[in-house]
Image (spheres, grey):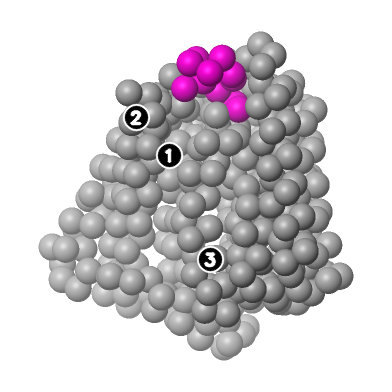
C-alpha cells in the first residue's frame, strides 16, 4: 500500500505538472506573451511545481525533513545522476556562456548551507532565498532583452514543449487538471514517504533525499538522455544549473516563508548531505569551467559517486531517525 501511495503520488505529480506547464504555455501564447517571459516564469516555475508542492505539503503536515531532503537530494541527483548517465552515451559539451549561472549556483548553494547551519529556517531565511531568485530572474531577463540570440533560443525552446492544447476548453482543462492534481499527488507522495520511512526504520529525510529526489529528477533525466541520443546534450548543463538554482532559492525560499513554524535542519543532513551537495556543485563547476566536456570517464565517476552516496546514506540511516 505504501509503495502504491508513493508511486501513485509521483505519477500524479509528474502528470499534473506536465499538463499545467502545457496549458499555461498555450494560454500565454494566446495572450501574446513573449517566449522569453514565458520561459523565465511559466516554464521555469511550472517544471518545478512537483518539488514545490511536495515541500509545501511536507511542512504543512509537520514532516519538514521530507521538504529539506527533497531539495538537497534533488540537487545531488541532478548533478551526479542526471549529468552522469547521459555522459555514458555521448560526451556532454559545456557551454562556456553559463559561467555566470554556475557562479550563481555556487553562491546560492553556499548561502543555503550557511542558513541551514544557523537554522532553523524561518521566514527571514525564506525571504533571503526568494530575493535571490528574484535577482536571478531579473538578471536573466536583462540578458535576454539585450541579446536577440537568447530571445530566439527561448522561442525555439518553447517549440519543444509538445502537445500544446489548441482551443480554449482544452487549455482550461489542462490547467485545471494540473492545479488539482499537484496537491493530490503531493498528499499521496508525502503519505507514502512517511509510511516507507517507518517501515524501513529510517528517517523521513532519508526518503526525501533518495526516493523522492530521484523520482522528481526523472523528467530532467529523461530530457538529458533524449538530448544525448540526439547528440544535443549541450543543453543539459544549463538545465541542471537552472533547476538547482530554483530548488534552493524558489522552492526552499517559498517553503520557508509559508511554513507555520521554522524548519529544523537534521544534524546528519548538516554533517553529510549538505557537504555532498556542495561537493557536487563544485565538481560540476570544475568540469564545466576547466574540462569543457564531460566524457564517459567523468560520467562514470559521477554515477559511481552517486551510488556511494546512496550506500552511505542508507548505511548511516540504520541509526535512529533524524528528527520529525
Callout 2 touching callout 3 (CB < 8 Å): no
Q: Which residue is mark 1?
A: 53
Pinpoint residue 230: horizontal percent, then vertical percent. Answer: 52, 79
Q: Quadrant of residue 26?
A: bottom left
Q: Residue sitting at 49 percent across and 70 percent down?
A: 226
Q: Residue sitting at 43 percent across and 39 percent down?
A: 53
Question: Quarter holding the N terminus?
Answer: top left
Q: Quadrant of residue 180?
A: top left
Callout 1 touching callout 3 (CB < 8 Å): no
Residue at mark 2 to residue at mark 3: CA–CA distance: 27 Å
Q: Earlier in the sequence, mark 1 or mark 3?
A: 1
Instruction: Identify the element where label 2 is drawn.
Output: helix
Residue at mark 1 to residue at mark 2: CA–CA distance: 16 Å
Instruction: Identify the element where label 3 is drawn.
Output: helix
Q: Which residue is mark 3?
A: 225
Q: Residue sitting at 42 percent across and 61 percent down?
A: 42
Residue with the most extreme left position: 169
Residue 119's place in the image compared with 308, above or below, is above
Residue 244's place in the image compared with 252, above or below, is below
Residue 5: image tag: 2
10 Å crowding of disc 1: few (<14), some (14-19), many (20+) = many
Residue 222 highlighted magenta (yes or no): no
Residue 97's place in the image compared with 46, above or below, is below
Question: 22 left or right of 301?
Answer: left
Pinpoint residue 136: horizontal percent, then vertical percent. Answer: 64, 60
Is residue 111 visible in the rendered image? The answer is no
Residue span colored magenta: 196-206
Amino acid at each position: 500500500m505504501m509503495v502504491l501511495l508513493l508511486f501513485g503520488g509521483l505519477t500524479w505529480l509528474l502528470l499534473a505538472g506536465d499538463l499545467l506547464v502545457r496549458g499555461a504555455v498555450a494560454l500565454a501564447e494566446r495572450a501574446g506573451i513573449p517566449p522569453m517571459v514565458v520561459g523565465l516564469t511559466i516554464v521555469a516555475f511550472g517544471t518545478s511545481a512537483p518539488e514545490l508542492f511536495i515541500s509545501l505539503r511536507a511542512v504543512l503536515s509537520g514532516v519538514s525533513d521530507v521538504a529539506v531532503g527533497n531539495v538537497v537530494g534533488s540537487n545531488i541527483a541532478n548533478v551526479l545522476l542526471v549529468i552522469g548517465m547521459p555522459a555514458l552515451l555521448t560526451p556532454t559539451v559545456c557551454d562556456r556562456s553559463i559561467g555566470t549561472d554556475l557562479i550563481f549556483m555556487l553562491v546560492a548553494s553556499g548561502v543555503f548551507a550557511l542558513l541551514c547551519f544557523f537554522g532553523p529556517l524561518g521566514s527571514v531565511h525564506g525571504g533571503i532565498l526568494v530575493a535571490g531568485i528574484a535577482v536571478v530572474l531579473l538578471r536573466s531577463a536583462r540578458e535576454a532583452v539585450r541579446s536577440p540570440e537568447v530571445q530566439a533560443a527561448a522561442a525555439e525552446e518553447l517549440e519543444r514543449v509538445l502537445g500544446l492544447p489548441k482551443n480554449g476548453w482544452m487549455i482550461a482543462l489542462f490547467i485545471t487538471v494540473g492545479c488539482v492534481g499537484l496537491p493530490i499527488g503531493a498528499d499521496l507522495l508525502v503519505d507514502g514517504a512517511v509510511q516507507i520511512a517507518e517501515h524501513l526504520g529510517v528517517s523521513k529525510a532519508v526518503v526525501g533525499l533518495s526516493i523522492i529526489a530521484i523520482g522528481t529528477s526523472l523528467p530532467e533525466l529523461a530530457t538529458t538522455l533524449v538530448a544525448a541520443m540526439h547528440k544535443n546534450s549541450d543543453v543539459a548543463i544549463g538545465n541542471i544549473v537552472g533547476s538547482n538554482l530554483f530548488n534552493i532559492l524558489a522552492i526552499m525560499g517559498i517553503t520557508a516563508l509559508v511554513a507555520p513554524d521554522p524548519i529544523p535542519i537534521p544534524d546528519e543532513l548538516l554533517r553529510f548531505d549538505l557537504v555532498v551537495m556542495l561537493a557536487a556543485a563544485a565538481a560540476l563547476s570544475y568540469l564545466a569551467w576547466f574540462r569543457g566536456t564531460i566524457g564517459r570517464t567523468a560520467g562514470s565517476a559521477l554515477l559511481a559517486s552517486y551510488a556511494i552516496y546512496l550506500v552511505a546514506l542508507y548505511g548511516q540511516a540504520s541509526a535512529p531517525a533524524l528528527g520529525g
